[in-house]
Image (cartoon, rainbow, N blue to C red):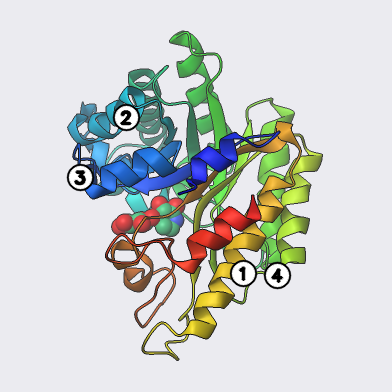
Amino acid sequence: PTFLKVKANKLANPFFVGMAVKAFQLTNGSQYDIILKNEFSSISAEYEMKMDQISTASGVYNWTVADKIVAYGNANNINVHGHALVWHNSVPEWLKNYAGTDAEFALEVKKYITDVVTHYAGKVKSWDVVNEAADDNGGTMRNTIFLQRMGPNYIKDCFQWARNAANAAGDTNLLLFYNDYATSTNIPKQNRVFSIVDDLKASNLINGLGYQMHNTYLSPTKAQIETDLNKAVAKGLRIHVSELDIQVNQFNDISTFTNERRLAQKAKYKEMVQIYNALPAANKYALTIWGMKDNESWIPYSTELNHVGNDWPLLYDANFTIKSAHTGFLEGL
Ligand code: XIL
């Protein structure tokens, strides 16, 4: 068979093919492990490297699970992308309820970023430093605890702390990403993201932009995606398609995965890969799929998406069999 990463590796301008993983899946010799090693050249932790997982109290860390994921990547010559240092949906309880002053709150965030980047220096090639800081309405900043406690410069501060920690640890090649979703269709949000990017660029703090791409078989259109990605190209940024999945049942209007939807999904995977593959070499990094098997996808359970029914958004079905979506991916290369 032709494996995704093998084909992507043979391109004139290759890129990593990434997979979102959970530590329990990484058992040596399991079917999951074999597919992962054959098909994928990068991993992101689906949730186990977020702040609420690693930070149990001020200055107290649970590294065990995250270390397992990073060690798996390092041992198997698989790139490790760090996801994510600062995200409003993964704030640990102790920090949510922090009784200290705003200045002390900022110091806690600084300490967290510094300690985590230092711990994984040389082992994690890139980090999403801040995730989802733009609001969905009106192109404003999302009103998170970080904005409230640290003020509008918090994103820049976080990137600066990450950069300082990496440099101090001797890792001058760490790639720093800003990551967000729905920017191809929500133009005020897209504009906000690029104003965040411009601000970071002015201080030479950002290397790349992560586009989550939790898409559907209908949306966004090719032109919408290209316009969005080309803005990052124009700014000389690396582009990470960081969380790709393609829903086919957004409105719960089908009860089984129909052949028509199967082919529509295949076409959409192919289109996304073609768009990504056409990027200039200097702007490529990785195209990461948010889960391997349909039955393990976050989509039907996400509160963020308000998804009411079942779905089949990934490349493999529940039995580890490749879907037409997988063929579409290969055809896009
Ligand atoms: C999701 C994971 O898939 C779930 O397993 C977890 O419970 C919640 O987070 N945007 C992101 C990802 O940046 O981290 C989210 O992942 C999906 C939305």
The residue drawn where x is 34% and y is 46% is 35
Name the front one of labels 1 and 4: 1
Residue 30's label in the rendered image is 3
In this view, the residue in front, 244 or 102, is: 244
Mark 3 or mark 1, earlier in chain: 3
Q: Alpha-carbon distance for marks 1 and 2?
A: 33 Å
Q: Identify the residue position indicated by label 4 in the image.
A: 221
Helix, strand or loop at mark 3: loop
Residue 70's label in the rendered image is 2
Helix, strand or loop at mark 4: loop
Mark 1 surroundings within 10 Å by alpha-carbon count, few (fewer than 14), some (14 through 19), many (20 or more): many
Mark 2 or mark 3, earlier in chain: 3
In the displayed structure image, the side of residue 298 where residue 271 appears, left or right: right
Mark 1 or mark 4, earlier in chain: 4
Mark 4 or mark 3, earlier in chain: 3
Q: Residue 162: x and y, percent?
A: 48, 25
Say whether marks 4 and 3 touch (CB < 8 Å). no
Mark 2 surroundings within 10 Å by alpha-carbon count, few (fewer than 14), some (14 through 19), many (20 or more): many
Q: Identify the residue position indicated by label 1 in the image.
A: 267
What's the residue type where badge 2 is placed? Val
